[in-house]
Image (cartoon, coloured by chain):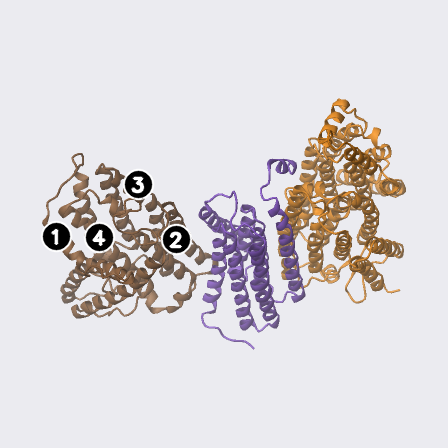
Amino acid sequence: MDSTFLFSILLIAPGAGAIISLIPKKKIEIISSLISAALTVGISLILLILGVSGSTSNGYFYSDGLTRIMIITISSIFLTSVIYSTFYTKKIKEPFLKFRWYYCLLDLFVFTMLLAIVVNDLGFIWLAVEATTVTSALLIALEKERTSIEAAWRYTLIVSAGLVISLFSVILVFYSQGTLDFTKLIEQPVKNTLIMSMAIGFALIGYGTKAGIAPMHAWLPDAHSEAPAPISAMFSAILLPTSLYAFIRTFTLLKDAPQFAEMQSLVIGFGLFTALIAAIIIGNQRNYKRMLAYSSMENMGIILVGFALGGIGTLGAIIQIISHAFAKSSAFYTSGNIVIAYNTKKISDTQGIIDKLKSTGYLFILSCFSVTGAPPFGVFLGEFLILSQAVQSKNFIVAIILSIVYMYTFIGLNRQTVQMVFGQKIDEGYMSYNSSVSSNSELPIKDDRTINEVETKEKNKKENWVSILVPLVNLVISLIIGIYMFPIVLQSVTTGLK
Amino acid sequence: MVFIIPLYDDIIGLLGISVILSSLYMQGQSYVDPIIRAIAIQSLFIAILIAILFLQNGDINLLYLAIITAAMRVIVFPKIMLYQVRHFKHSLREKGSNQKTPSLMLIGIIVVIIGYTIFKTVLFPLIPDTQQASIPFILLLLGFLLIITRRDTLAQISGYIQEENAILYIGAIITPGIQLLTEFAVVLDIFGVVILGVILSKQRNVFRTLDREVIEQLKG
Amino acid sequence: MEAKIKVPDRFILEIIDIIQVGTVVLLSPLIAGIINRLKAMVESKHGPSIFQPYYDLAKLLKKEVVLPKRSSLILIMAPFITFTAYLVISLVVPVVTPYPLPYGILLDLLGGALMFGLAGIIGIMAAIDAHTNYTAMGASRSASFTALAEPTLITIFFAIAIITGTNNPYVTNNTLAISPSWYVSATHILAMTAFFMLILVETGRLPVESSGLMELGMLDDAKIMEYSGKLLALSKWSSYMRQLLLMAIFVNTLLIPWWMPSEVSVLDALYSVGILFLKLLALILVVVVIEETFAKLRLFKILDFLTVSFSLALLSVLSLFLVGKGGA
C-alpha cells in the first residue's frame, strides 16, 4: 500500500468529519467526529506499525519516527477529546457556537495539526500551524464569558503576530537554501549557515510564541484556563508539541553547521527559562486550570531542552511529548469535571473534592502526579532521560537548573492539588449557607421553582461514566508508556554511559 | 517582457518611504476608520511596488502576487473591517486610550531608528542584496507597536495585516520566486484572522468595558 | 561654485546686494497685503487695499512710542535686533540670484536657521520684559511651539545638507535645478512638506493661528502687544520680512529653483525680482486656499501639528539611510 494513500486518508478523515458535522441533523456531528477520530487513530496505528519513513513518492508528505509519534498522539487525544466533549458540552448553558460548529471546528483543528505534522514543505508547515490558530480561536470562546472571549482574542492576536516572525524565518530559509521542500533540505548540505542560524532564531521566537516559550507565553494561561476542558486538553497535549515540532523541523536542518553549538545553547537557554518561569509561577496560582497551563509550559520548556541537547535527550523529549499528552489531557478532563461540579476555577473554593466526586478526585491527583514526573509514569522517564543527557554532555548548569525545576514544579503543583482533593473545606456550613443564599435569593416567593432548580443542579453535577473513563484511559496509557518504555530507556542510558 | 523604468531606484525608494509613512500615520490616529483606510493605502503601495518589480524582472509570479495583494489586502479586508465599523456599532474611537497619539508617532520614529540600527548591525551583513530590506523589518516592528498600543480589535487586526505586509514586502524584494501558493495561503490566513476578529469583536463590544474582575482573572 | 569674480563685477554685485535686501525690505509688506486681500476676496469681502501694510507702517512710524513703566532696555532693543537679523539673512539667501553674493560666506543654511532662532528668542525675551499678561502668554506659547519648530527647521536643513553635501543654499538651489530626479526622492518630498507646514506655523497662518487680535488664539501678535509707534512698525515689518524670507527660501531653494537668471547683471537681478514675485504669488495662492479650507486647530493641537511636521522632517533624513541617497 502506498503511504501517500494512508496519509491522505489521515488528513481526509477529520476534514470529511468537519464537513459532515455541518449537516443539520441531530447527533450527526458527534457521530461523524467519532468516526473520523477513530479512523485517524486506526491509520496512525498502521503508520506506526508499518514504520513508514521518508517522503512519499509524490513528495507531498514526509514522515520519520517523531512524525509517527506525533500522529498517534494527536489522533488519540482527538478521539478522547471528542468522547469527553459529548459529556462536557451538555453542561454549557449558553454556548458561543452551535454544537455543529463546535465539532466542525474541532475536526478542522485536528486536520490542521495533522497537516502541520505530515506535510513535506516548511511553508506549508507554517501555514498549517497558523491555521490551527484560526480554527481553534472560536473554540476557546465556547463558554461565552467575558474572560473567555477576551482570552480567545488575545490568543488569536498574540499567536498570529508571533507566527509572522516565523514566516520571516521561512522566507530566510528559502532565501538561503533555495527550496522549502523538507526532503531536499535534509539531503542537500546546508548553505549560508549564518542566515540559517538567523532563520532558526526567528523560528524559535515565532513558533515559540505558539508553543508557550517564555517570554512569549502571555496568551497561554488565559487560553488554557478559559477554554472548555476538552479544548484545554487538546491545546496543552497536542497543539503546543505541534508548534514545537515545527520549530524542531527547522532546527535540525542546521545540524552540521559550525553555528549549531551556539544555536543549541540559545535554544536550551529559552527552554530552561520557560521551565523556570513556569515552575516559579505555578506555586502561586489560585486558579487550577491556569496552574495546569503553567505545568504545560514547564513541560514544553523541558522538551525543548531535550531536543536541543540531542542524543538520548531527544528520546526523552519524544517520550515526554507522548506521555505528557496523555497525562495532561487526563488532568484537564478531570478539571472539567471539577468545573462542572463546582462552577468555579478557584482553588480555594474547591477544597475536598474527594467528598463530592470520589473518582474524579483520585484521577485528578494521579494525573497531576503524572504530569509533574512521578516515577511510574512516562513523564518521569522523559525528564530523567533529558537530565541524564545533560549530565552526560557535561552541561552541569543545565542539569542543576533542570533538577530545581523538576522539584519545584512537583512540590508547587501537588501541594495545591493535594489540598484541593483531600483538604477540608474551611467552615463548610458557612460556605453552603452562603451559596444557598445567593442561589435562593427569591426563596420566599418562588419556593418550589428554586428547589427544583437545586435538584436539577444536583443532577447535573454528577459525573457519568464518560467523564471518568476518558481520563482514566489516558492516565493508564501514560502509565503503560512509562512501564513499557522503562527497559528501553534503561538500556539506552546504560549504553550511553558506556 | 522587461521594461526599463526611468528613475527606478527613486520610485522604489519613494514607495518604501510612503509605506513607512502610512504606518506612522496609523500610529498617530486614534480613530479606527483612518487606520483601516491607511492599511488599504499601505497595501496599495506594496502592490504597486511589486508590480514595478515585475516590470523590472519580468517574473510573472510577481504580477500574480501584485494582483492578489491589490484584490485582497487593498479591497476585501478593509471592506470587511469597514463594514464591521458601519453596521455593528463598533466604537469609532479608542476608548480610554490616551489622547497623545501624535506622541506615539514620535515613538514610531524612534522605533524606525532602532529598527534601522538593528537591521544595519545584525541583519544587513546577511542580506546585502538591497539596502531597502530594512524597510520591511522596520514595518514589522511598527506593526508590533500598533498591536501593543491599541486595544481596539480592528486596529489590532490592522497591525497584524501590516506585519504580513512587511513579510510580503521582504519576500518580494529578496526572494522573487517564493512560491505563489504560499502567498495565496497567507492571504487566506489573514482572511481567517480578519473574520475571527470581526466575530469576536462583536462580542467584545457587548462587554465594552473590561471590568476589574475580568482583568484580575486573566492575570498571573 | 567658486566662480572667479572679476574686479569690475564687484561693483555690480554690490548693487545686486542692495537690490536683494531692498526686495526683501520693500516687497515684504506687499506680500502681506496681497495675502490679506486674497483672503478677503475668497471670503467674498472687499478687503483692504494690497498696499494697506505700507500705509500702516507709515502711520505707525509717525507716532510716538509709549512703553510700559517696568520694562527695560530689552523691550526697546528687541525690534532693532530682530530687524537687523532679518536684514543679515536677506543678504545671504538666494532671493534674486542663483549665485552667491559677496556676503554669502557669512552664513550657511544652518546659520540662517540659527539667525531665525535668534530673532525668535529676542522677541520672546522682549515679550516677557513687557510685563503684561498677554505678552507673557504669547511668550510662553511661542516658546513651547518654538521648542518643536526650531528642531524641525534644523532637521530640514540637515536633510538638505545631506542631499547636496553642503550647507550652502546656493549649491542646494543649483543641485535641485540641475537634477529633477530629486523631485521623486522621498527625502526631498518629505522635507518640502515639513518645511511648508513650518511656514504655516512661522507665518501665523491657519490651521495654526488666525492672525488678528483674538486674544485667546493669538501667538505672534500677542508678543508685540505692548509696542507702539515706531517700535511697533519695526516689529511688524520684521514679521513681514520673516514671512517673505521663509517663503523665498522655500520656493527658491526647495520647491521651484528654476528660472533664475545666472548672468551677473543688474538688469537680470531686477528681472529675477519679478520672477520671485510670481513664484511667491503662486505660493500665496496655495497658502490662502489652505487657510480658507481648514478650521483653526485647538491650541494644544498645534503641538500635534508641529510633531507631525517634526516627524516628517526626521523621516526625511532617515529616508536617506533607508532607501539610499537617490538622485542623479
Q: Which mark is residue C140?
A: 3
Lower position in the chain sequence, tag 3 or tag 2: 3
Spatial CA span between label 1 and label 3: 30 Å
Q: Which mark is residue C136?
A: none
Chain assignment, label 3: C
Lower position in the chain sequence, tag 1 or tag 3: 1
> Local crowd at mark 2 within 10 Å, few (<14), some, or many (≥20)?
many
Residue A102 percent coordinates (x, y):
75, 51
- Identify residue for label 2: C309
Hey, what amino acid is under mark 3? Ser
Q: Is residue B64 above or below residue C121?
A: below
- Mark closer to the observer (3, 2): 3
Q: Secondary structure at mark 2?
A: helix
- Mark closer to the observer (1, 4): 1
> Local crowd at mark 3 within 10 Å, few (<14), some, or many (≥20)?
some
Lower position in the chain sequence, tag 1 or tag 4: 1
Spatial CA span between label 3 and label 2: 20 Å
Hey, what amino acid is under mark 4? Tyr
Lower position in the chain sequence, tag 2 or tag 4: 4
Provide the letter of the chain coloured brown.
C
Q: Is residue A210 above or below residue B67?
A: above
Q: Are marks 1 and 3 in contact (CB under 8 Å)?
A: no
- Identify residue for label 4: C86
**Residue A310 vs residue C137: left or right?**
right
Chain A shown in which color? orange
Do the residues at pointers 3 and 2 share their chain?
yes
